[in-house]
């Protein structure tokens, strides 16, 4: 079950512009964040509780109000408790009608080969990510088969592992042998 929280409306008293957001924390802390750099004094107009999927409900509320969007979470619309409750109820029904998106495995053979070579090289995910110039979360997600990579990132990972791209793509035993020989020549030890 995903997190519940609050959908809130924050706005100034001197103009028709409101910030509509969702939070699993306190609405007061969101008010303080919104106030930073805002020219008018902001206040909480209304808040409604959402028992689950608060962030998905927030996104759906924003879609429902797209024609009033000023930018980010700011909208040119007047909302009171009754209107917000009706809007949130509609958004919740729409969220329930759509299944929660699940990460899709893109084929894990590529990620498994990266993981195997990384471990043989004695590298952590963080060390490989640093050498390849990417966040370590990318390496983790690629190894799990949850994320693909661009051609540039693919080449950087192969280079950081001192392994042929053919091997990472699983293009045959010859690629493995050549790649291992190249790695031995570069590192001075068998991979």
Image: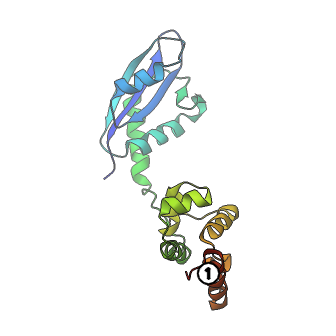
Question: In the drawing, does residue 58 fall left or right of residue 182?
Answer: left
**Nearest the camera: 2 or 162?**
162
Label 1 environment density (alpha carbons within 10 Å; few <14, some 14–19, many ≥20):
some
**Nearest the camera: 44 or 76?**
44
Figure check: 46 above or below 190: above
**Nearest the camera: 113 or 43?**
113
Q: Residue furthest front?
A: 188
Figure check: 168 above or below 89: below
Q: Position of residue 146 (x, y in %)?
A: 50, 65
Q: Is residue 142 visible?
A: yes
Q: Residue furthest bottom?
A: 173
Q: Check the image and tell me how it is coloured.
A: rainbow
Residue at position x 64%, y 70% in the image: 158
Secondary element at tag 1 = helix
Q: Position of residue 167 (x, y in %)?
A: 63, 81
Residue labelled with disc 1: 184
Q: How many marks?
A: 1
Q: Which image quadrant: the C terminus?
A: bottom right
Q: Is residue 145 visible?
A: no
Residue at position x 58%, y 28% in the image: 68
Residue at position x 34%, y 38% in the image: 24
């Amino acid at each position: 079950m995903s997190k519940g929280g609050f959908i809130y409306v924050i706005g100034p008293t001197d103009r028709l512009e409101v910030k509509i957001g969702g939070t699993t924390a306190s609405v007061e802390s969101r008010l303080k964040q919104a106030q930073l750099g805002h020219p008018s004094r902001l206040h909480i107009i209304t808040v409604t509780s959402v028992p689950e999927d608060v962030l998905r409900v927030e996104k759906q509320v924003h879609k429902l109000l797209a024609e009033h969007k000023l930018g980010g979470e700011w909208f040119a619309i007047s909302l009171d408790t009754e209107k917000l409750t009706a809007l949130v109820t509609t958004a919740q029904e729409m969220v329930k009608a759509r299944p929660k998106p699940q990460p899709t495995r893109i084929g894990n053979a590529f990620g498994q080969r990266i993981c195997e070579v990384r471990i043989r090289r004695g590298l952590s995910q963080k060390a490989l990510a640093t050498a390849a110039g990417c966040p370590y979360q990318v390496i983790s997600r690629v190894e799990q088969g949850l994320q693909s990579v661009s051609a540039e990132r693919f080449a950087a990972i192969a280079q950081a592992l001192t392994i042929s791209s053919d091997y990472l793509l699983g293009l045959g035993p010859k690629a493995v042998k050549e790649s291992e020989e190249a790695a031995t020549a570069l590192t001075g030890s068998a991979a």
